[in-house]
Amino acid sequence: MNETFGDGTRVVHAVQGSPGEPFGAQPVFASAYHLGGDDFYGRVSNPTWRALENALGSLEGGECVIFPSGMAAIMTLLRTVLSTGDTLAVPSDGYFLTRRVVSEMDMNVVEVPTAGPYPSFEGVRLVLLETPSNPGLDVCDIAELATAAHAAGALLAVDNTTATPLGQRPLELGADVVVASDSKAVSGHSDILFGHVTVASAELAEKVRTARTSNGAIPGPFETWLALRGLATLDLRLARQAENAAALYELLKGRVEGLRWPGAPEDPAYLVAAQQMRRFNGVLTFELESAEAVDEFLSRLRVVSAATSFGGLHSTADRRAQFGDPVSPGLVRFSAGCEDTRDLVADVSHALGLD
């Protein structure tokens, strides 16, 4: 798709298909195929996989390999790139399960806050960033860190889950790899688990794809089709979610502690975020005085649901400390959905006793 087209045109046509075919690829259910074509066995390839991989790859500017979850994508990448005794740098404030898993692997792990300062990458094999970080929403300079990593002989991967393929293109900023949980905004409907890896190198893409075939971390064709269908509306959903997040930020500004949304000019991450992000999304965080205060807030909501995810159609909120994130007991991660802005603001205002 021509890069001069807007995001809405690009996502719609990335999943549309070709003349004479259905509007959008359909799920192909097969474990075996007649030999002589592009496919021969269901653990190796599937036409529906290729449709989604081509769509995501076109949006991110690389070669995409899809997985049944974000963690399957990350773990396959790590096992493909790293060997016993290698050194891996990860965000100390990123997704808690990634940190937990790598701490159990036979390698050296260096934890660095997303906002830095960063040490020398000498001796590091892979630098894994998460920007904006989840749940803290800090941001780091991808281009600067890619230059530093490459100078030290390291690869740089970016977890792009929060930003999405429309909000940020890490490969264009110098990253070698993009990983993401597509259970969030890409699929957008909170009904599937999904993930992907997109790489700049065709050679590395083939290694990741071979690892997927070997370890059996393959997505189902129906879930793949659901992700493909959800991707087509990503532009529309992001626009409403960002609009809602901006309105909520204005409501909460000066009324809660620790308010973060990288799309706000007052946010500490805004200057870097505005340089490398093409658009913002609906995820913001803030702090209430205690876990009990968060429970009270959640119980008073009527439009917003208490749930532990983000990027979906429905607005959700959860208290992150209960899941192992190293944050204050009262930190709330709020995912603004696609409800009417007026209704969402009124609901949050009422739940916090601001009306």
Image: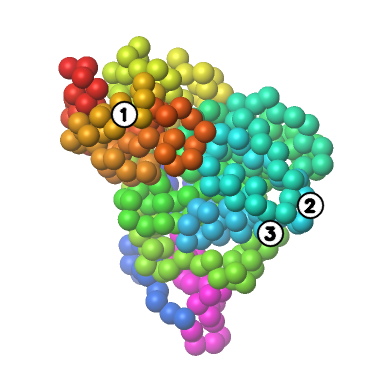
Report which residue position mark 2 lands on.
85
Determine whether the residue tagged by mark 3 lies in a helix, strand or loop: helix
Q: Residues within 10 Å of mark 2 (few under 14, many from 20)?
A: few
Callout 2, which amino acid?
Answer: Gly
Kind of residue at badge 1: Glu
Queried whether the magenta region covers residue 68, the answer comes back as no
Instruction: Give the image location of residue 157, x and y in percent.
Output: 64, 44
Q: Which residue is mark 3?
A: 80
Residue 225 position within the rendered picture, expressed as x and y whole percent measured from the top left:
38, 63
Cα gap from disc 3 to disc 2, whole angstroms: 14 Å
Residue 94, disc:
none
Q: Is residue 53 visible?
A: no
**Helix, strand or loop at mark 1:** helix
Residue 312 at x, y percent in the picture: 33, 44
Q: Give amino acid for label 3.
A: Thr
Locate residue 272: give its quadrant: top right
Q: x, y (%) of residue 8?
A: 37, 43
